[in-house]
Image (spheres, rainbow, N blue to C red):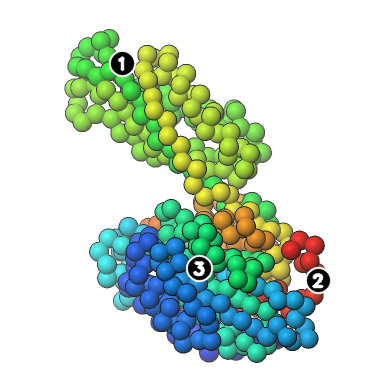
Amino acid sequence: MTTETILDAVAAVEDRVVELRHTLHRHPEPAFQETRTAALVAEVLSELPLSVRTGVNRTGVSALLTGDTSRKDSHRERTILLRADMDALPVQEETGLPFSSEVPGVMHACGHDGHTAILLGTAMVLCGLKEDLPGNVRFVFQPAEETTGGAEGMIREGVLENPRVEAALGLHLWGSAPRGIVEYKPGPFMAAPDSFTIRILGRGGHAARPHECVDPVPIAATVIQQFQNLVGRRVNPVLPAVISVCRVSAGNTHNVIPGEAELEGTVRTLDPALREEIPAMMEAVVRQVTAIHGADYRFDYDFRYPPLINDSKITALLRDAAQTVLGRERVREAEYPTMGGEDFAYFAGAVPSTFFFLGIAPEGETIQHHHPAFRVDDTVLKDGIAVFCRAVFDFLERDAVLEQRL
């Protein structure tokens, strides 16, 4: 398939894709409440020669495009999966856009409306080129990326089977990258975003008589400080790790020492072994600090998404595809991984995959995600579609180059 043909097909659907994104942006829905979004996705997909399945992991949508696997350049029936997330965030929009959110307190503040529109456009283009497609494409529109991880449930309900998926691609519109720039990286790319809650159990009393109390507030402060020492002195410095205490809660007035304090936060790691070790290290800190001061504690740790690790061969395929449709000057390897998390990690853990960023930031600026003023530049939507389409054809058309890995 020629790149010129792909780009012409992308140009033909661009206006509709932009319109779809604006519609999605007006009607954002939080995790596992994406009913209107899923209905719109299913409606668009039903216009195409696809086998569409709704209600996957509650509100997810899956569609299969069956190409011509009898073609002479079809070495076997390969299937590649493309994924977009659909959920919005509990954020009150402050962009002033003419298509701003019409739902109070809910906003697409992370670009998922763009991801969904890009994947719908990709489905339109690939369906139009179906007769030249020597394999299958699975389109996955998943719920709940921002919360509990909708990807895992969709995998459990079979989106990687019938036919068996051999590779997966995903993208994220990225506010830290310049507009229209693709950033990729083989290996660890995004962190495991685990979380914790710690209760420091002391003994309350009058603020004028602290000697009769076990004050949980300074104990909590010591725990927080020691967590930073843990990262700085107990963790191998070549292995990235972050422990952030993001909420501290204790007491309700100025002259009463509270009976307990609560800490809530997140731990970010890229190395799977270190990820398993850190909770025990943290609990040892809490146990020792509380014991010194005569307090007790409760320690709860939640392993959330795993680290997102990109397959080297699929990443190379994606890089080459992006360079072909966008030019080498618009494709670059990311300098380092990000400590943000992504539940595409479940796909990457199941099949050879890669996840990449598509920049949306004006020159010299950074667009903050999860922010009331978050904006997506509509001009990059066509770039995401073109990269997806070129990568799909490259994967399905090539011979046994990937056979050893797949």
Helix, strand or loop for disc 2: helix
Q: Amino acid at mark 2?
A: Ala
* x, y percent for residue 278: 55, 34
Rounded to the nearest angstrom, the CA distance separating label 3 from label 2 is 28 Å
- Circle 2 packing at 10 Å, graded few (<14), some (14-19), many (20+), is few
The answer to whether 390 appears left or right of 202 in the picture is right
* x, y percent for residue 198: 39, 31
Lower sequence index among marks 3 and 2: 3
Q: Which residue is mark 3?
A: 84
Q: Which mark, residue 400?
A: 2
Residue 184 visible in the picture: no
Q: Amino acid at mark 3?
A: Ala
- Circle 1 packing at 10 Å, graded few (<14), some (14-19), many (20+), is many
Q: Which residue is mark 1?
A: 214
Q: Are marks 3 and 2 in contact (CB under 8 Å)?
A: no
Q: Amino acid at mark 1?
A: Val
